[in-house]
Image (cartoon, rainbow, N blue to C red):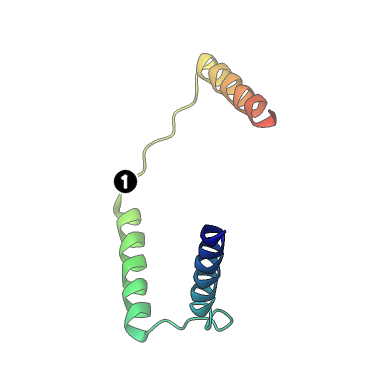
Amino acid sequence: MKTLVFFLALTLSGVASAQQGRRHEGKPQQMRQEDRQRMREDMNQVYRDRNSRPERPARPMSPQEREKLRKDVQDANKQLKR
């Protein structure tokens, strides 16, 4: 019986402490100006890197490759339905 009361008290104290961390949950967090600027610079760098890479030329698929891809997609769809 004492063990049950102990675990109940432990559980309730855990719930109470978890709820204390949710005080600011309703307010959206604002990013600092420095964080926004750093994110903007990071994204600009990504776009620059992407545009500087040469694109691979697209080659048409052979009938065998197309058939294998079709079967793979059908098998994957069957597994998802299960």
Vertical relation: 74 (above or below) 7: above
Closest to the observer, 48 or 27: 27
Closest to the observer, 24 or 72: 24
Question: Which quarter of the rendering shows the C terminus?
Answer: top right
In the visual, does 55 lie left or right of 19?
Answer: left
Residue at 46 percent across and 83 percent down: it is 30
Vertical relation: 12 (above or below) 53: below
Residue that protrudes farthest toward the top in the picture:
64
Residue at the disc numbered 1: 54
Is disc 1 surrounded by few (<14), some (14 to 19) or many (20+) residues within 10 Å? few
Residue 31, by quadrant, is bottom left
Residue 75, by quadrant, is top right
Vertical relation: 73 (above or below) 49: above
Instruction: Please state the horizontal and vertical placement of residue 56, each as a whole percent of the image.
Output: 36, 38
Closest to the observer, 26 or 1: 1
Hey, what amino acid is under mark 1? Pro
Residue at 52 percent across and 83 percent down: it is 24
Instruction: Please state the horizontal and vertical placement of residue 42, each as a whole percent of the image.
Output: 32, 67
Question: Which quarter of the rendering shows the N terminus?
Answer: bottom right
Instruction: Please state the horizontal and vertical placement of residue 72, each as a whole percent of the image.
Output: 56, 22
Vertical relation: 31 (above or below) 1: below
Closest to the observer, 16 or 6: 6
Residue at 52 percent across and 14 percent down: it is 64
Residue at 60 percent across and 19 percent down: it is 71
